[in-house]
Image (cartoon, grey):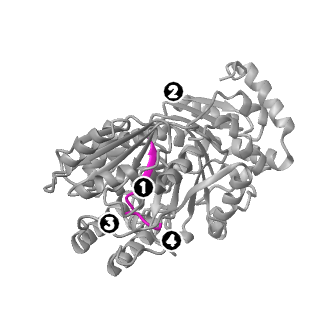
Amino acid sequence: MSDQFDTPIAERTADETLRQRLSMRTKIILDHTNSVAAQRDHRIEQNRFYYEDDWRYMRFLVPEGLRVLELGCGTGQLLARLKPAIGVGVDFSSEMIAIARRNNPQHTFIVADVEDGNLVSKLVGPFDFIVISDTMGSFQDCITTIENLLPLCTRDTRLIVAYYSHLWEPILKVGEWLGAKTTEPELNWLSSHGIVSILELSGFEVIKREWRQLLPKKWFGLGTLVSRYIATLPGIRRLALRNYVVAQPSRERRLGTPSASVVIPCRNEKGNIEPAIRRLPRFCDDLEILFVEGNSDDGTFAEVLRVQAAYPDLNIKALQQKGTGKGDAVHLGFEKARGDILIILDADLTVAPEDLPKFYAAITSGKGDFINGTRFVYPMETGAMRLLNNWSNRAFARIFSYLLNQRLTDTLCGTKVLSRTNYRKIIANRDYFGDFDPFGDFDLIFGAVKLHLKIVEIPVSYANRRYGTTQISRFSDGWLLLRMVLFAYRKLKAL
């Protein structure tokens, strides 16, 4: 951090300069904030349930051990609970910052106006997460303030804006009148949609939104029950007190032509091995192809070895999984792959290998961080998917879109693409979900959502098998899908 914040004299000078440049409204807010600073932590303790619920969800959004900047940090309680490796808090209240420094000496706290573009240029970025919790309500110029944050970001930086719902304004005013809530100067009237518009105008693209808390009091356990299991339900959640928006910089990122690894899980797919090689376009200079064979009884592995020898000009690897299931095969393939971009292609070839260049182009051009195929845009080849499977897949996709807070039309399309870097991050965070997914699809999707990766879908044509029989059971796999729904609800919603 700049040396100008290191001495009391320099800080007093900065404080006086800050006050001179503030608008009359902002001065009123500053005076109010300074006047309530000494009681701030006591007020938080009085409303412990409300703050604990907010902090718990913030900890879900922000993994520990990263670089975190909080604008409008108050006494530093939220920043401390996020447990960053490097934590920086900025607030224009010198009284608040004094308490934050005393209680959290492991982090850096700065007295400054977050709307001052010169301040942002003095912060040492980039940051992994930038958090603005309630502070946007006091901004004079929301768009310029958010725009000024872009130099502190990489493409992977995530901006989190948390604010209260304007629908609760009358109730909060009553709370102030009754003394249950600190009286505050007039703040900005911001809906969740309004925050999204501001972020998009400021050079950020929104990844997801969430709404939480219907009862901000514990009330003998009723508040916990409602907040976890009712407040997040469709239709009801828009009435919640708190809303959260997660965004990333929208500046386009081009990766050039990185290396790629195509992982092809195969069990009893002997007749599809050579067609996969013949049909797969050579869409980058450094292309690796890994067949992961899963205990076949039709000679699939022998066919993989034959094809490997028959195409010596291609980088083909043959692996045999010790475990069972597609998920285990994908884990093994990704572990052994050396490409910068990791791609899954199902060996049944119902999704055409010829479509893979579209997936590669989408991720290398920065259109998305996790590219997922969808089979429900183009008409399917007759008989490619049974009617009951079609209906259930569409229904489950709608449910998962709600659970994941990102739109997905086809969770079980086998073609998925992500970078090796992001896959390593998913592995590092896998303890949160555990080993729960025999499909392999949800392990990646849930991991991507937990990391706030931008998910983009690419339509693909879905064809009949030319060899072998489907290995999907409508009823047993349908039951597994239902289990995935309940699991996702518990891990992503009922926090």
Q: Give the Cα separation between the discs numbered 3 and 2.
A: 39 Å
| Mark 3 surroundings: few (<14), some (14-19) or many (≥20) residues within 10 A | few
State the residue at coordinates (51%, 50%). 357
255, 195: nearer the viewer: 255
Residue 113 vertical placement versus 398 (above, below): above
Q: Earlier in the sequence, mark 4 or mark 2?
A: 2
**Residue type for callout 3:** Leu
Q: What is the magenta range?
A: 409-419
Mark identifier at residue 353: 1
Majority SS type along the magenta span: loop
Q: Give the Cα separation between the discs numbered 1 and 3.
A: 33 Å
Q: Label 3's element?
A: helix
Magenta stretch containing residue 411, yes or no?
A: yes
| Mark 2 surroundings: few (<14), some (14-19) or many (≥20) residues within 10 A | some
State the residue at coordinates (34%, 56%). 346
**Residue type for callout 4:** Val
Q: Earlier in the sequence, mark 3 or mark 2?
A: 2
Q: Label 1's element?
A: helix
Residue placed under numbered mark 2 in the picture? 106
Q: Label 4's element?
A: loop
Q: Is residue 159 left or right of residue 464?
A: right
Of tags 2 and 1, the one toward the viewer is 1
